[in-house]
Amino acid sequence: MRAVCVVPASSVTQEEIETLLAQAAVFDRLVVVDNGADELSLKSIPVTGSTSLSSIRFNSPLGKAEALRIGLRVLMDESNYSAFAQLDVHDKQPAWQVKSLIERLKQTGADLVVGNRYVTPLEEGSHRHGLMLLFCSMVRLSAGYRLSDCVCGMRVYSARCAAAFISESFTYGYGLELEQLFIAARNGWRTVEVGLQSRPQFNSTAAEKIIENLHVLVVYARKALDQRYIHEMLAQMKARRSFSIPGQWLSLDGPLTSNSLGQAKTVRIHIKLDMLQRHEMPYRCVELGT
């Protein structure tokens, strides 16, 4: 199975680039797309002239998703590849692990294999644990995929997935990984998960990442939505204040809510019990320090 990889690069260090290049032999072809990264960090990568390693450079930031689409288009035009990988340029999840995702793609016949950074469960009550619970619950309810890490940047997929990600995606930023799940679900494709070795993630998540992921979730719910309410909800989420996601967006009776207590000192993410029972999901309620 010939495997190729696209790496959107932005705000990277020379050490991260060198670590990636040292593992480039995992792939038959690797393309790094400069999404506003410091050109000096990419000086070790040839722009042209290499059959296995090259970079695409732009003068201004594109957004992570657009950088990936450009890299995929280049690879789709070059040859017939059977496995497409994507990963972030940082080395929290070393690139050599993509081999296990490629092998799972081959063994299972799945179209999309997603990395799981949380083989060791996140600490309950942490900010990241609450976000994973919220995002994965909504993905399960909307797309039917039961995943522990729905926004991991390391994943492998088939050629038909790659073609769909080029032509059907709309996001330009951090909502990329979630959107790929919804596109795969819309096409009826199978998704599986593989555990990764991963260095600890940051305890908190940047507000713009939360907002872009929520935007993707809302769009793919495909309901008539109150645009003013959406903007108010996003503002509350960014400020770590109370917000709720109406259940009708996901064809549910009850809402998904996040209640801020004591001037945002504690956040409780609560998913209604009877709603979860209908979808065979365990009841979860966690308090998050903010």
Image: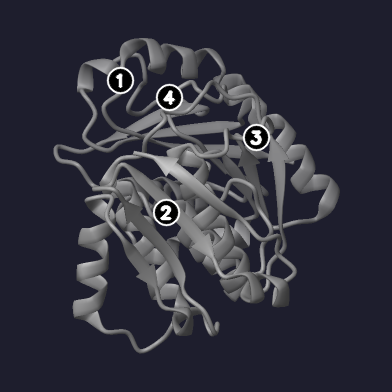
Which class describes the residues within 10 Å of circle 4: few (<14), some (14-19), or many (20+)?
A: some
Callout 4: SS: loop
Bin the neighbour count of mark 1 within 10 Å (Cα to Cα): few under 14, some 14-19, many 20 and up: many
- Asked if 230 appears above or below 129 in the picture, the reply is below
| Cα distance in 3D space between marks 4 and 1 | 13 Å
Which circle marks residue 90 in the picture?
Answer: 4
> Which label is found at residue 176?
2
Q: Earlier in the sequence, mark 3 or mark 1?
A: 1
Name the quarter where the C terminus is drawn: top left
Mark nearer the viewer, 2 or 3:
3
Q: Are marks 2 and 4 in contact (CB under 8 Å)?
A: no
Mark closer to the chain start, 2 or 3: 3
Q: Disc 3 designates what residue?
A: 121
Q: How many marks?
A: 4
Judge the density around disc 2: few (<14), some (14-19), many (≥20) Cα neighbours within 10 Å: many
> Nearest the camera: 151 or 262?
262
On screen, 41 above or below 242?
above
Q: Amino acid at mark 4?
A: His
Amino acid at circle 2: Leu
| Callout in the foreground (3, 4) | 3
Q: Amino acid at mark 3?
A: Pro
Using the rendered view, name the quadrant where residue 211 is placed: bottom left
Residue at 22%, 16% (x, y): give it: 40
Which of 15 and 202 lies nearest the eye of the viewer?
202
Q: CA distance from mark 3 to mark 1?
A: 35 Å
> Where in the figure is residue 208, as x and y percent of width and height?
26, 48
- For marks 2 and 4, give the CA distance: 17 Å
Q: Which residue is mark 1?
A: 42
